[in-house]
Image (spheres, rainbow, N blue to C red):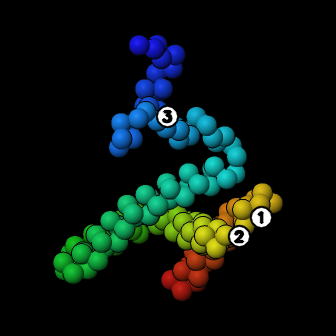
Amino acid sequence: MSKTIDTREAVMVGRRSDGTLVRRPLSPHLQAYDMLQMTSALSITHRITGVVWSVGMVFLVWWLASAAGGEASFNGAQWFFGSFFGILGLLGLTAVAWYHTLNGLRHLYWDSGRGFDLPTTYLTGRAVLIGTAALTALTWLVMLITWI
């Protein structure tokens, strides 16, 4: 019986349907990525914003359910969304929605087989970040103009 030098080797060995041994490759994990690299950071942020956006939908459902639940429950929800923490949360959700949308469009561009060269990857990454900031600011500017 051979000694395994690395414990990860145990998960690399498998058997084919005919019983012969085969060595499977390990997928790279977080240790393999440079977190300060733009492509890695944008990819991880895209996943995080997807989760945050899903959690934000809970607040939308709460707001809609309170509107259907009557004046008292709607006033409570409106009070929360009009508070400092509510506005801060809505501002964050606006940024999350724009980022996730723009980065999703970037992924659709990649799905067409284009944009994989490094200069284009960095250009589209910067465009996502700048677009997120600009569209979030524009959204809140329009909202404040129509609200006041």
Report which quarter residue 81 is drawn in: bottom left
SS type, badge 2: loop
Residue linked to disc 1: 120
How far apart are the alpha carbons under marks 3 and 2?
Answer: 33 Å
Report which quarter residue 105 is drawn in: bottom right
User: Could you say which is closer to the camera, residue 37 or residue 81?
Assistant: 37
Left or right of 99? Residue 55 is left
Amino acid type of the residue tagged 3 in the rendering: Arg
Q: Is residue 134 visible?
A: yes
Closer mark to the observer between disc 3 and disc 2: 3
User: Could you say which is closer to the camera, residue 73 or residue 21?
Assistant: 21
Residue linked to disc 3: 23
Q: Is residue 83 above or below residue 39?
A: below
User: Could you say which is closer to the camera, residue 33 or residue 71?
Assistant: 33
Closer mark to the observer between disc 1 and disc 3: 3
At label 2, counting other C-alpha atoms closer than 10 Å, the crowd grade (few under 14, some 14-19, many 20 or more) is: few
Q: Residue at x 57, y 75 (%)?
A: 140
Q: Residue furthest right?
A: 119
Q: Residue at x 51, y 20 (%)?
A: 6
Q: Which mark is residue 114?
A: 2
Q: Is residue 115 above or below residue 13?
A: below
Q: Are marks 3 and 2 in contact (CB under 8 Å)?
A: no
Amino acid type of the residue tagged 1 in the rendering: Thr
SS type, badge 3: strand
Q: Are marks 1 and 2 in contact (CB under 8 Å)?
A: yes
Amino acid type of the residue tagged 2 in the rendering: Arg
Q: Which mark is residue 54?
A: none
How far apart are the alpha carbons under marks 1 and 3?
Answer: 36 Å
Q: Residue at x 47, y 61 (%)?
A: 50
Q: Residue at x 56, y 51 (%)?
A: 44
Q: Position of residue 85 (x, y in %)?
A: 43, 59
Which of disc 3 and disc 1 is earlier in sequence?
A: 3
